[in-house]
Image (cartoon, helix red, strand yellow):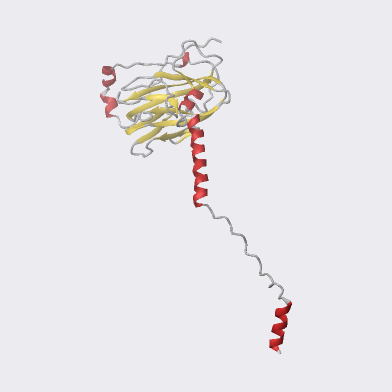
């Protein structure tokens, strides 16, 4: 099955990113975005593995099956919102009032194979100096291209290979990144995770989840022979210490009182005679 590649990378010039509208700068409350023409034309066909990926269901400010998380979870640093007004597509919003790495999250269990993970996003007042709005996994280095400045709706996504044993992953609609905290507002809609029959020839960016996770595990310090030498040295130290400071060998137990040797017959007679 031929699968069209998704336009993943949207590049903003520095001048365009800095030309923010005065309306976006002055707005304190999020308003629903106008409905744009479907951006799903390039999304691979197949069922969406995310629950409530269109954010249509929920209550209050909480869409079903999604949760929030951030490096700093103080409400004075980041606020989250769910827009679901009539006439507009539902959206999730991350509003970083102070530099932060904040996101909406959903946990999935994925079987082996290739997946496309994508969403539509736009931004307001997001500086270029740190990570912008993206869809990612909630772990280091697996993320889509990001948006900055005042960017209109764009499709963002990535391709993920899951190893033969499957994996649990957290899909994140994110503003900021690990060690790259940012401010501004990010809007997301139509998030999806689709299993692929095959990886498109021009797919980008691509990630091998097993390889990424292995790279994040600290290797053992030293070489195998140094480990063996260390154990040998420890064994020698233990033996020498036992020889020097170990418990003294137990002295033989004292023999029980032996009966006096038999008195010579002559001595007995002399004593008997004295007693008389």
Instruction: Please report the residue visible at 42 percent of the width from the left and 23 percent of the height from the top.
Output: 143
Picture mark count: 0
Residue 70 seen in this snapshot: yes
Residue 187, horizontal then vertical, whole percent: 38, 26
Image side of residue 27 versus residue 250, left or right: left
Where residue 19 sits in the image (x, y, percent)?
A: 26, 20
Q: Which residue in the rendered view is the most extreme toward the front?
A: 266
Q: Which quarter of the figure is the C terminus placed in? A: bottom right
Which residue occupies 37% across, 16% down?
10
- Give coordinates of residue 42: x percent, y percent: 47, 13
The answer to whether 214 appears left or right of 177 in the picture is right
Q: Nearer the viewer, residue 121 or 61?
A: 121
- Examine the rendered structure and indicate whether residue 41 appears above or below residue 185: above
Q: Residue 181: image x %, image y %?
A: 34, 30
Residue at x-position 36% and y-position 21%: 147
Quadrant where the N terminus lies? top right
Q: Is 165 positioned to the left or the right of 203 in the image? A: right
On the question of residue 38 being in view, the answer is no
Q: In the depicted view, which residue is nearer to us: 147 or 211?
A: 211
Viewer-nearest residue: 59 or 236:
236
């Amino acid at each position: 099955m031929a699968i069209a590649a998704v336009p993943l990378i949207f590049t903003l010039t520095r001048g365009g990113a800095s030309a923010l509208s005065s309306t976006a700068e002055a707005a304190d409350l999020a308003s629903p975005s106008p409905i744009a023409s479907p951006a799903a034309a390039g999304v691979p066909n197949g069922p969406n593995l995310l629950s409530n990926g269109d954010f249509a269901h929920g209550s209050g400010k909480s869409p079903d099956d999604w949760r929030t998380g951030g490096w700093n979870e103080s409400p004075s640093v980041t606020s989250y919102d769910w827009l679901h007004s009539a006439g507009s597509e539902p959206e999730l919003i991350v509003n970083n009032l102070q530099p932060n790495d904040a996101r909406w999250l959903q946990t999935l269990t994925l079987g082996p194979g290739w997946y496309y993970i994508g969403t539509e996003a736009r931004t307001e007042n997001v500086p270029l100096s740190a990570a912008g709005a993206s869809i990612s996994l909630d772990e280091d280095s697996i993320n889509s291209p990001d948006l900055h400045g005042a960017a209109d709706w764009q499709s963002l996504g990535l391709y993920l290979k899951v190893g033969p044993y499957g994996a649990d992953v957290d899909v994140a609609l994110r503003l900021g990144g690990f060690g790259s905290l940012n401010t501004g507002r990010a809007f997301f809609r139509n998030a999806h995770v689709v299993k692929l029959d095959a990886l498109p020839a021009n797919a980008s960016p691509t990630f091998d989840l097993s390889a990424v996770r292995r790279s994040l595990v600290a290797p053992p310090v030293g070489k195998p022979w140094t480990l063996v030498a260390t154990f040998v040295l420890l064994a020698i130290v233990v033996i020498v210490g036992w020889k020097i400071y170990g418990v003294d060998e137990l002295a033989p137990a004292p023999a029980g009182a032996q009966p006096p040797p038999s008195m010579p017959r002559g001595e007995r007679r002399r004593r008997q005679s004295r007693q008389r």
